[in-house]
Amino acid sequence: MISTAGGTGTRTYVITSGALPPVVMLNGNGAVTGTPTSPGVYNFTVQSTDANACVDTHAAMLVIAKGAQAITGFAANPAAPVFTPNGSFAVSATGGASISPVLFASTSPMVCTVAGNTVTMHGPGTCALTANQAGDANYSAAPQATLAVVIGAATQAITGFAANPAAPVFTPTARSPCRRAAVRRTTRCCSPRLRPWCARWRATR
């Protein structure tokens, strides 16, 4: 609404130079109507006339700001992946009203990296992801969205645990009661009863 103070009776208004945004109009009573379709700064001059035909001229400016937009629905599929070497999972998000695409990135490259909407896993841990959407002529850039995806550690199992041969048969090993005597090359440790046996045992060594 445009209005001026003073004057007599009802005033009427008209734009004498410059312009309002497309589809926006100034009515004679000073009301501004219509929904702007594009942002920008619009300078114009308004002339007001009262009941006595007294005329006033005023410079005016109308600023139409860019629209805001937001990224929503930022998610991973699956939401809790389990690590596999060079395994991957997908991410998605819904962008705002601009024509710019949503771009994904990783801020934890030791754990994960991103190409397009595919996340490649490099190890278990927290995969920190971002989503960004630039602005255009009508909309400002969307605030950055973030997502933390916890990549679980892979499980492992021991397999193939076996003996070779699978069923061994016990084989006793002969031992001499005069072992110390053999080491010392003497049979003094042997009793008279065992000396013949010790002699035969030494002969086999």
Image (tube, rainbow, N blue to C red):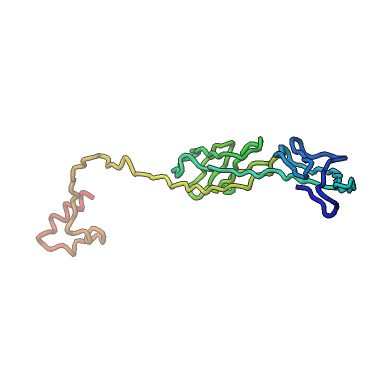
Relative to 35, is 150 above or below? below
Asked whether, in this view, residue 7 is left or right of residue 153, the answer is right
Work out whether residue 102 or residue 105 is closer to the camera in this orientation and state it: 102
Work out which residue is located at the far left of the displayed protein and give it.
193
Asked whether, in this view, residue 44 is left or right of residue 23, the answer is right
The picture places residue 72, in percent across and down from the top left corner, at 56, 43
What residue sits 31% from the left and 40% below the top? 160
The picture places residue 191, in percent across and down from the top left corner, at 13, 63
Work out whether residue 139 or residue 131 is closer to the camera in this orientation and state it: 139
Work out whether residue 55 or residue 102 is closer to the camera in this orientation and state it: 55
The picture places residue 44, in percent across and down from the top left corner, at 84, 43
Work out whether residue 200 or residue 146 is closer to the camera in this orientation and state it: 146
Q: Looking at the image, can residue 63 be seen?
A: yes
What residue sits 82% from the left and 49% below the top? 9
Number of marks: 0
User: Image quarter for residue 33?
Assistant: top right
User: Image quarter for residue 37?
Assistant: top right
User: Image quarter for residue 99?
Assistant: top right
Asked whether, in this view, residue 169 is left or right of residue 14, the answer is left
The picture places residue 110, in percent across and down from the top left corner, at 55, 47
What residue sits 90% from the left and 48% below the top? 54
Q: Looking at the image, can residue 110 be seen?
A: no
